[in-house]
Image (cartoon, rainbow, N blue to C red):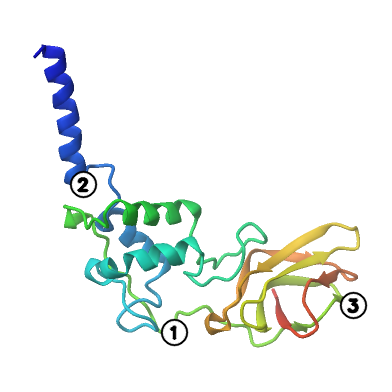
Amino acid sequence: MTRALIAALAVVLAGAVAQAHGGRDAITWNREVSRIVYDKCASCHRPEGTAFSLMTFADAQPRATAIKDAVLARRMPPWGAVKGFGHFRNDQSLSQEQIELITKWVDGGIRRGNNPGMLPKPPVFDAKAATPVPKSGLRVSGTVTLEHAMRLDGLMPERLGPGRSLQIVAILPTGRIEPLAWLHDWDSRYRHPLLFRQVIELPAGTVIRGIPVDAVVTFFPA
C-alpha cells in the first residue's frame, strides 16, 4: 500500500469518526437549537407556560420530528403574518436560517452536544411582561377611508375566522400603497397585536383595504 493511499484512507477514517461523534459542524441542542427555543418558544413551552415544556433536551428530543414539521409549515411559533409584508417590532416568527438550523438538527441525528457549558441560561419570564394590548383604537370592517390623519402603531385581528388569510394595505391619497399586514392561516387561540417597527403616517383620505366585511381588525394609534 502506497503512502498516498494510506494518507487518503486516514483522512476518510478521521472524517467518519468525527461525523460519528457529532463533529464540529453538527447542529446540537446545546450550541444552536436551545437558543432558538429559549428565544422564540419558551414563553409558552415551559413548565409554567400554556403548552408542554421544551426547556430541556429531554423535553425536546422525543418531539423533535414534530417540531421540525411545525416550523417548516410555520405553524409554530404562531405568529400568523407573512414575513416581509409589513415589519413588526414584536415579530416572534422564525427566520429562514433558524428554520434550517432546526431542520438540520433533526435530520442530523437530534444531537445534544458534548459540551454542556455551551448551553445558555434558561430565560426568566415575568407574568406581567406580556405585550400590552392598547385599550382603544379604530375598529375596521370592509374598506374604510380615513377622515382624519392617523399615526399608526399597530393592529390586531379582533374577529377573524380560523384559517383565514387576507392582505391589508393602506392606499395613500398619492396612490402609493403601504403594505400593513398579510395575515395567513390565522389562529385566534394565539390572538396578539402586530406592532409596527416604525410608526406609519396615514394622511386623511387614506383608504384601508383588504379586510372583509365579516371580519374586524383594530388599528392602534401611536
Mark 3 → mark 1, Cα distance in angstroms? 36 Å
Q: Quadrant of the C terminus?
A: bottom right
Q: Residue furthest front?
A: 1
Return the residue at label 2.
22
Number of the label disc, if any, that sits on residue 147: 3
Return the residue at label 1.
128
Secondary structure beneath label 1: loop
Task: Say what amino acid the circle numbered 2 marks.
Answer: Gly
Q: Residue at x 11, y 19 (%)?
A: 6
Q: Residue at x 82, y 80 (%)?
A: 142
Task: Say what amino acid the circle numbered 3 marks.
Answer: Glu
Q: Earlier in the sequence, mark 3 or mark 2?
A: 2
Q: Quadrant of residue 166?
A: bottom right
Secondary structure beneath label 2: loop
Q: Residue at x 71, y 80 (%)?
A: 217
Q: Quadrant of residue 14?
A: top left
Instruction: Where is residue 202? Give x, y as percent.
Output: 81, 67
Using residue 214 as the reference point, say whether residue 110 is left or right of it. Answer: left
Q: Earlier in the sequence, mark 2 or mark 1?
A: 2
